[in-house]
Amino acid sequence: MAQILELQQAIRAHVHDGDVVALEGFTHLIPYAAGHEIIRQGRRDLTLVRMTPDVIYDQLIGAGCVRKLIFSWGGNPGVGSLHRFRDAVEKAWPQALELEERSHSDLANAFAAGASGLPFAVLRGYAGSDLPSVNPQLKTIQCPFTGEQLAATPSVRPDVTVIHAQKADRQGNVLLWGILGVQKEAALAARRCIVTVEEIVDQLDAWPNACILPTWAITAVCCVPRGATPSYAQGYYSRDNIFYRQWDEISRSRTVFTDWIDRHIRQTADFTGYQASVRTAGGQLAS
């Protein structure tokens, strides 16, 4: 059953050095507040998993939290490269970054297999691809019924999955809607799951079958308004496109990046403090 906790408590209790961590969200409901708290608490040697690592993973990598990345695509959406990600891969700054690259369909199936308690996923994929040449974990398997050669890939079972959602009730049942990626599968595949939400309400007032993440699937629920900023939360606020463009400049320089992380994340108490700090510095936040 889910506990209602402050975000600092949840990260301290449930995210440990060396953990495999998935912070999932697909352009929408990306858990920035939780990612910042991981940086603030100085977690190290994490293996991060995500279908589409973007700016929050760039921040975690540049802050020295990450040892390995399991991913299918990486970039600053609509802008370009992730410069801290590239620096870690190309020049081992602030430390070397081990990569395990997969396809989108692979990771989606791997999360689903993990949620089902299976050791691997099977898919029609990688035919004609060179990804298996750089990822020895990608295998082929023969279908026992048709003889067809299929791709087999290890399931993903994070130590902890972190997602953002619109609301939860006081029992810890979570409601999310809009564009979704693999949040449900990533949550159900994990040993522990932290959900940050825009608000906690007495009643979800949800239509039948709308609650796909009941309290028994969640470890902790944390109320963090605007916790997906600069991404967006449908029904609450829009995407901050200006920030994504600003990040391209901030992240190009190691010095500028480090100063930004120190000032706005490490030297603030929480995500509310971060937002105030960015506003004071003249940064843009979505309204």
Image (tube, rainbow, N blue to C red):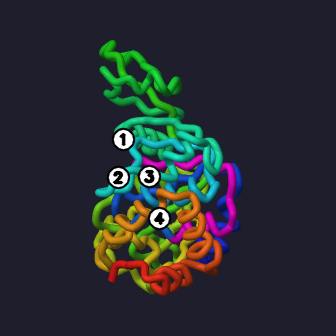
Q: Which mark is residue 160?
A: none
- Asked whether residue 15 is drawn in magenta, I would say no
Where is residue 95? Give x, y as percent.
65, 46
Q: Which residue is mark 3?
A: 82
- Distance in Å between CA atoms under marks 4 and 1: 28 Å
Relative height, residue 257 to residue 92 (above, below): below
Left or right of 78: which side holds 144?
right
**Residue 41 is inside the magenta segment:** yes
Q: Nearer the viewer, mark 3 or mark 1?
A: 3
Q: Badge 2: few (under 14), some or many (20 or more) residues near its Cα, within 10 Å? A: few
Residue most extreme to the top: 147
Report the amino acid beneath label 2. Gly
Q: Residue at x 33, y 28 (%)?
A: 125
Do tag 2 and tag 1 residues touch (Cβ < 8 Å)? Answer: no
- Give, as a single range, the part of the protein colored magenta: 33-53
Residue 104: which numbered mark, if any?
1
Residue 250, label in figure:
4
Label 3 to label 1: alpha-carbon separation: 18 Å
